[in-house]
Image (spheres, rainbow, N blue to C red):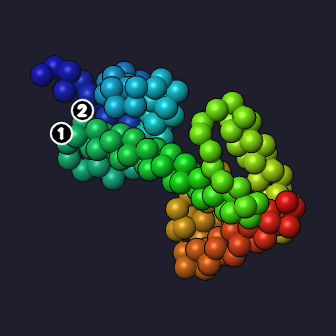
């Protein structure tokens, strides 16, 4: 019970603009949420990244929290959402890499074989070629591919960074993929 009262006092300090209060609050949140996120991710690096994103979200929005007694459920929800975002980005990245590899295999006429050392070497070489071809794309196409595939940003974020609409960002990404496929097919 006393811990909740202390948390509410530290939260009040942080909301009033006190940097010391914000620092104590961030430490408190880190210590409490670290085991929670680690149990989900089972990876210390990913846990630390997620907690950093969680703390940034807290710092940006802590002043908007009206009911201080709901602070911990709010923080757990932010941490959960950041964890799910991380897993979603990983799935999208894996999917994008697999799509590019399939396109490259189709362009080369290669048939995927069993998973041996030679296949791993070929896959590594293909990824190097894809990375090299991305660097050769038109700057606008290269930027959109990097934002979508490497940084795994949603189209809404890409649109805000490139000062366009999400629909136009989606179309630009499609065109960039087509251009990349063409470059890869020509370089075979």
Classify mark 2: helix, strand or loop.
helix
- Front position in the image: 30 or 3: 30
Few, some or many C-alpha atoms within 10 Å of disc 1 (few <14, some 14-19, many ≥20)? some
Residue 106 in percent (x, y) is at 68, 63
Gap between marks 2 and 1 measured at Cα: 7 Å
- Front position in the image: 57 or 20: 57
Residue 30 in percent (x, y) is at 40, 26
Is 15 rendered above or below residue 171?
above
Few, some or many C-alpha atoms within 10 Å of disc 2 (few <14, some 14-19, many ≥20)? some
Left or right: 148, with 73 as reference point: right
Say the numbered circle drawn on residue 108.
none
- Say which label, 2 or 1, has the lower sequence index: 2
Is residue 150 among the parts visible in the rendering? yes
Q: Residue at x 54, y 67 (%)?
A: 155
Say the numbered circle drawn on residue 8.
2
Residue 37 in percent (x, y) is at 36, 30
Q: In which quarter of the image is the N terminus?
A: top left
Q: Residue at x 46, y 36 (%)?
A: 50
Disc 2 + disc 1, Cβ < 8 Å: yes
Q: Residue at x 53, y 54 (%)?
A: 95
Q: Quadrant of the C terminus?
A: bottom right
Say the numbered circle drawn on residue 69.
1
Question: In terms of image quadrants, where is residue 181?
Answer: bottom right
Is residue 16 among the parts visible in the rendering? no
Q: Residue at x 69, y 30 (%)?
A: 117
Classify mark 1: helix, strand or loop.
helix
- Front position in the image: 18 or 134: 134
Residue 103 in percent (x, y) is at 67, 62
Question: In terms of image quadrants, where is residue 14?
Answer: top left
Name the residue at the left extreme: 1
Left or right: 184, with 85 as reference point: right
């Amino acid at each position: 019970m006393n811990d909740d009262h202390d948390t509410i006092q530290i939260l009040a300090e942080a909301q009033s603009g006190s940097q010391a209060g914000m620092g104590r609050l961030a430490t408190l949140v880190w210590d409490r949420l670290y085991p929670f996120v680690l149990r989900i991710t089972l990876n210390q690096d990913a846990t630390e990244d997620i907690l950093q994103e969680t703390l940034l979200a807290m710092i940006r929005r802590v002043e908007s929290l009206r009911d201080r007694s709901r602070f911990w459920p709010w923080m757990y929800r932010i941490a959960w959402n950041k964890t799910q975002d991380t897993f979603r980005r990983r799935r999208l990245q894996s999917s994008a890499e697999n799509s590019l590899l399939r396109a490259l295999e189709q362009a080369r006429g290669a048939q995927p074989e069993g998973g041996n050392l030679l296949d791993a070497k070929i896959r590594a070489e293909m990824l190097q070629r894809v990375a090299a071809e991305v660097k050769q794309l038109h700057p606008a196409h290269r930027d959109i591919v990097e934002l979508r595939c490497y940084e795994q940003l949603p189209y809404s974020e890409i649109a805000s960074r490139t000062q366009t609409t999400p629909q136009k960002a989606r179309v630009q990404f499609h065109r960039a993929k087509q251009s990349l496929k063409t470059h890869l097919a020509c370089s075979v």
